[in-house]
């Protein structure tokens, strides 16, 4: 304990930034850290899939059609979670399926956060017609049910990984845009913004260098929460057959594949379903912890 | 020198700042009457080079708005601002930005006026890099010199604002305002957020910097003790109007306007022998959205007569550089 107290005194030159303090608070929250580690494991699975997966996820073997998991009668330890209707290894397909979920989750959230942040900053700081235009578009997009909006877009553009990302970004940017606009409206009245104007700082400097660093934590927190939503939406689209196309493994389409024989071969749908559940739950718990760490006012 | 006396550094004429409330689309559709908040009402004054003009008034009387409008941080509704001989009222943004080197502001709240995510070096060095005045290496040297001249250690450069006390933070704010070598500085209640023990230190610092750097201050405060101490001349503001203006000594010793008398009566007297005429203020500051007709002060003035309720008093010259806006005051 005494070492922890002395540590900051040893380096008086560069002090802790608020962001660093928040990260340290986060690291003290065991439950959230565990959830974050689970998320990281999924990311590693996605990246290392070709080396980790025990079998080729596309290799069909009709002799192993609907082979049960290893611990059940007729199961085999080399196919731990059993096989699907085409005799493909379910574990390998889940590992490869994480690539789709993580890629789409990350891509959609990163792209829409970037777009939403810029538009939210513009709307909140410049006000006037810029604000009116952006806010109306946001209101209109918020009026559509998300899934139906995505289904309609997918029907127009056709399936495929890029199109899923596009279809989701079209609506997802609204969330960070609203958050950022609200935060900017509060931050622009702060005296340090006025001080920046008084020393002649240009508008872009004030928006991106003075205001943005101060509103970044809620944006990061919201983005991580939204990643869970996006992963569920991708699974929903793939479940409906308008997302990632076969034979590419996606958790959503794997659940759909097993739908017709849930009673006879429950493992085909159940394991990918559990994968979705665990990943989404972990992201939610970790982002909750991030929120508490970045904004101590909320935690109780 | 006498020529300098006649050419003010800053001259403000009939400056007006009106905020339009209720002017949103929905309010217009609902035909709600437009409300105008006249924060600054046709104010005129001038400041000579090297002078400190003290601006005093209650909270909400428009002092800060006046100062920010003079600096064009808020756009004036009408009137003119002349700085160093040229009219800056309508100066385009780009030229105004260049002019900001010469006119700076020190803020009231040293907790809100420093960006919490930036180190002291970044905060104090930013004006130099923005205006392209110094190269990267020189910036550091100039920041060090500036910090030392406001009484901070250069070893603290890497720290963040939250690691300083209120007084130290105000010193950082002063360093940021003065690093561009401005000629004119607005001090917007620079000590009212600080502990009394720290106030004196900051005021002493501001006064010695003024002497060293040849600064001109517009010093805003609601504390007449502070204003009396630092100012050469004093202007008293009430609900957007300047009601009295004159040399510091005269205003404090022989105030003309009943409002100034009331402000001075509120100051505790140590010397029991020197009792002043006491004027008590009753009631609250009226709403600036619907100010009283006639003299705005008549609702709280113990001397108000019928004329005060209808006729707006003009700010009249009383001789000896004194001015007051009151029907009951005659030239001496």
Image (spheres, coloured by chain):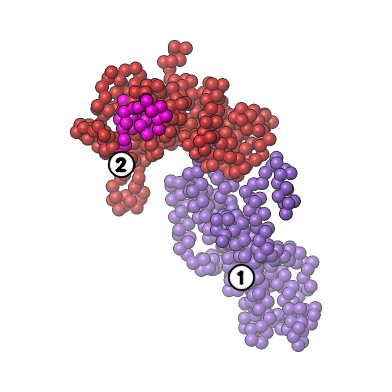
Chain colours: A purple, B red
The location of residue B27, given as percent across then percent down, is 33, 51
The location of residue A90, given as percent across then percent down, is 72, 76
Residue at which label 2 appears: B283
User: Which circle, 2 or 1, is nearer the viewer?
Assistant: 2
Look at the image and tell me in which quarter the C terminus of chain B lies.
top left
| B41 up-or-down from B207: above or below | below
The one of B33 and A74 positioned closer to us in this rendering = B33
Chain letter behind tag 1: A
The one of A154 and B300 positioned closer to us in this rendering = B300
Residue at which label 1 appears: A235
Res A118 seen here: yes
Q: Secondary structure at mark 2?
A: loop
The one of B42 and B163 positioned closer to us in this rendering = B163
- Main SS type for the magenta part? loop
Q: Residue furthest left?
A: B306
Contact between marks 2 and 1 (CB within 8 A): the answer is: no
Region in magenta: B256-284
| A156 up-or-down from B96: above or below | below
Left or right, residue A219 beside residue B58: right
Res B54 seen here: no
The location of residue A65, given as percent across then percent down, is 73, 83
Count how many numbered circles sit on residues in the image. 2
Indicate whether residue B266 is drawn in magenta: yes
């Amino acid at each position: 304990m005494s070492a922890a107290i002395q540590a900051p005194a040893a380096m008086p030159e560069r002090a802790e930034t608020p962001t660093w303090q928040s990260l340290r608070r986060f690291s003290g929250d065991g439950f959230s850290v565990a959830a974050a580690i689970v998320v990281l494991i999924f990311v590693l699975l996605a990246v290392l899939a070709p080396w980790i997966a025990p079998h080729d996820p596309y290799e069909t073997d009709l002799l192993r059609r609907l082979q049960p998991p290893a611990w059940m009668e007729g199961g085999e330890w080399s196919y731990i979670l059993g096989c699907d209707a085409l005799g493909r290894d379910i574990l390998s397909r889940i590992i490869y399926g994480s690539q789709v979920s993580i890629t789409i989750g990350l891509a959609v959230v990163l792209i829409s956060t970037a777009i939403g942040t810029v538009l939210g900053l513009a709307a909140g700081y410049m006000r006037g017609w810029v604000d009116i235009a952006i806010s109306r578009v946001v209101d209109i997009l918020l009026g559509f049910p998300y899934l139906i909006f995505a289904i309609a877009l997918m029907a127009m553009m056709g399936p495929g990984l890029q199109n899923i990302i596009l279809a989701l970004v079209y609506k997802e940017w609204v969330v960070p845009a609203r958050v950022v606009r609200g935060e900017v409206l509060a931050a622009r009245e702060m005296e340090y913004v006025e001080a920046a104007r008084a020393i002649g700082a240009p508008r872009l400097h004030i928006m991106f260098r003075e205001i943005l660093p101060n509103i970044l934590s809620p944006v990061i927190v919201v983005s991580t929460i939204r990643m869970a939503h996006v992963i569920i939406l991708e699974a929903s689209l793939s479940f409906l057959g308008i997302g990632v196309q076969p034979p590419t493994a996606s958790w959503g389409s794997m659940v759909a594949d097993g739908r017709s024989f849930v009673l006879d071969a429950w493992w085909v749908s159940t394991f990918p379903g559990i994968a979705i559940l665990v990943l989404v739950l972990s992201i939610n718990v970790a982002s909750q912890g991030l929120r508490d760490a970045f904004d101590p006012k909320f935690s109780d | 020198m006498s020529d300098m006396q006649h050419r003010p550094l800053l001259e403000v004429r009939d400056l007006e700042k009106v905020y339009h409330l209720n002017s949103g689309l929905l309010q217009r559709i609902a035909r709600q009457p437009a409300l105008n908040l006249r924060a600054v009402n046709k104010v005129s004054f001038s400041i000579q080079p090297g002078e400190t003009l003290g601006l005093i008034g209650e909270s909400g009387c428009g002092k800060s708005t006046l100062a920010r409008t003079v600096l064009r941080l808020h756009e004036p509704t009408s009137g003119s601002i002349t700085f160093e001989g040229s009219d800056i009222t309508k100066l385009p943004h780009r030229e105004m930005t260049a002019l900001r080197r010469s006119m700076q502001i020190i803020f009231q709240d040293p907790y809100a006026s420093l960006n919490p995510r930036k180190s002291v070096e970044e905060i104090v060095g930013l004006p130099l890099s923005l205006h392209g005045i110094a190269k990267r290496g020189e910036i550091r040297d100039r920041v060090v010199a500036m910090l030392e001249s406001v009484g901070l250690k250069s070893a603290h450069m890497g720290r963040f604002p939250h690691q300083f006390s209120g007084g130290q933070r105000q010193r950082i704010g002063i360093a940021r305002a003065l690093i561009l070598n401005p000629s004119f500085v607005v001090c917007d209640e620079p000590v009212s957020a600080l502990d009394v023990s720290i106030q004196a230190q900051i005021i002493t610092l501001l006064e010695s910097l003024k002497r060293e750097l040849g600064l001109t201050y517009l010093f805003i405060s609601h504390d007449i003790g502070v204003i009396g101490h630092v100012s050469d001349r004093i202007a008293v503001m009430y609900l957007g109007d300047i009601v009295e203006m004159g040399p510091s000594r005269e205003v404090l010793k022989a105030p003309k306007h009943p409002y100034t008398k009331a402000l001075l009566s509120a100051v505790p007297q140590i010397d029991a022998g020197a009792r002043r005429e006491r004027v008590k203020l009753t009631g609250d500051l009226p709403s600036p959205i619907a100010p009283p007709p006639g003299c705005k002060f008549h609702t709280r003035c113990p001397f108000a007569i019928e004329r005060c309720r209808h006729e707006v008093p003009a700010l009249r010259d009383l001789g000896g550089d004194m001015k007051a806006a009151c029907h009951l005051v005659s030239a001496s």
